[in-house]
Image (tube, rainbow, N blue to C red):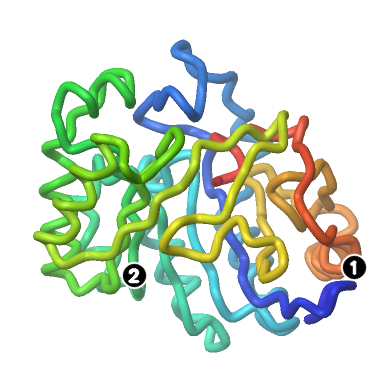
Amino acid sequence: MLDPFNRPINYLRISVTDRCNLRCAYCMPAGGVESISHDEILRYEEIVEVVKVAATMGIDKVRITGGEPLVRKGIVDLVRALASIPEIRDLSMTTNGQLLESFAFPLAEAGLHRINISLDAIDPQEYTRITRGGEVAPVFRGIEKAIEAGLQPIKINCVITRSSAETNARQVQEYARKMDIKIRFIRQMNLADGCFSIVEGGDGGDCSRCNRLRLTSNGYIKPCLFNDISYSVRNPGAENAITQAVSHKPACGTVNHVNTFSNIGG
C-alpha cells in the first residue's frame, strides 16, 4: 500500500488494552485515567480478523502494545494466532517489563519474534518516582528471561526530557551496553500540543519515512499518532477502515485531541 505521499505502508501497531500496572508521570495523571468499557475493547477474534485483512493489503509487520499488553488475559493466545498468519514476517511487542519474567518463554514459544522494553531509569528510587510506585528489579529479571528465550533483538525504550545526556538516560545506556542490548531514546511527547521528535536510535517520529498505521484498543484505525483522524474496523469494516486511513494519511503529524498514550500505544 502507498499513501498519498508514496510512502509504503506495511506496519500495524495494535493497542490491545488501555489498562496498565504503572502510572508513569509522562503517560497519565497520578490517579490514572478512566478506562474504556470492556464492551468497547476489541475481542481477540476481532483483532486477528483485522490483521488477516491487513496482511492481504500489504501489512507484514505487527507490534502489540497497550497500555501494558501483558496485563490482558490470554495475551499469549493472541500472539500465537497472529504468528500463524503467513504474511506477518515481523511480530513484536512493547512492554514495561513488570510481568515479563513470567511471560518471556511463553511468548517466544507462541511465536513472538522480538520485544521492546520501557526503562527510563535503573536507579530504584528514580524508577519508582517516574512510574509512581513501580519497582525496577522485575524489569531486570524480565530482560534476562527475554534474552534466554531468544526474543531478539531486545530494545530498550528510554524516555528523556531534553537529552540523552541526562543522568538517568546515561545510566540506562550503560546498563544496555553491559547487557549487549539496543537502546532508543524517545523525547517526551505531548499529543495535544503536537510535541514530538525523531527517536534517537530508531526511526519513529520521522514523518517522511512513516510506514505505520495504528489500531486502537476500542477498534479504530488511525493513520497517524499526532492526528485525530480514525476509522472504525467494526463499521464500515477492516478493509474499508484501512483503505480510508491509508488514503488520508497526512504528510506530517500535527495534534491529537482524541486519544491518550494509554489507549493508543505510543
Give SS at disc 1: helix
What's the CA distance linking mark 2 and mark 1? 30 Å
Residue contact at pointers 2 and 1, CB within 8 angstroms: no
Apparent side of residue 195 relative to residue 155 in the rendered image (left or right): right
> What's the mark number on residue 50?
none
Mark 2 surroundings: few (<14), some (14-19) or many (≥20) residues within 10 A: many
Q: Position of residue 224 (x, y in %)?
A: 73, 53
Apparent side of residue 83 relative to residue 256 in the rendered image (left or right): left
Please state which of residues 62 and 176 is positioned toward the viewer in this rendering. 176
> What's the mark number on residue 114?
2
Q: Position of residue 163 (x, y in %)?
A: 41, 41
Q: Is residue 26 visible?
A: yes
Apparent side of residue 180 relative to residue 74 in the rendered image (left or right): left
Apparent side of residue 84 relative to residue 106 in the rendered image (left or right): right
**Residue that carries the numbered disc 1 in the rendered image:** 247
Q: Amino acid at mark 2?
A: Arg
Please state which of residues 13 and 124 is positioned toward the viewer in this rendering. 124
Q: Amino acid at mark 1?
A: Ser
Toward which corner of the image does residue 41 lie, by quadrant?
top right
Mark 1 surroundings: few (<14), some (14-19) or many (≥20) residues within 10 A: some
What residue is rendered at 41% in x and 62% in y?
201
What residue is rendered at 69% in x and 48% in y?
225
Q: Position of residue 32 (x, y in %)?
A: 49, 18
Image quarter of the N terminus: bottom right
Q: Earlier in the sequence, mark 2 or mark 1?
A: 2
Q: Is residue 221 visible?
A: no
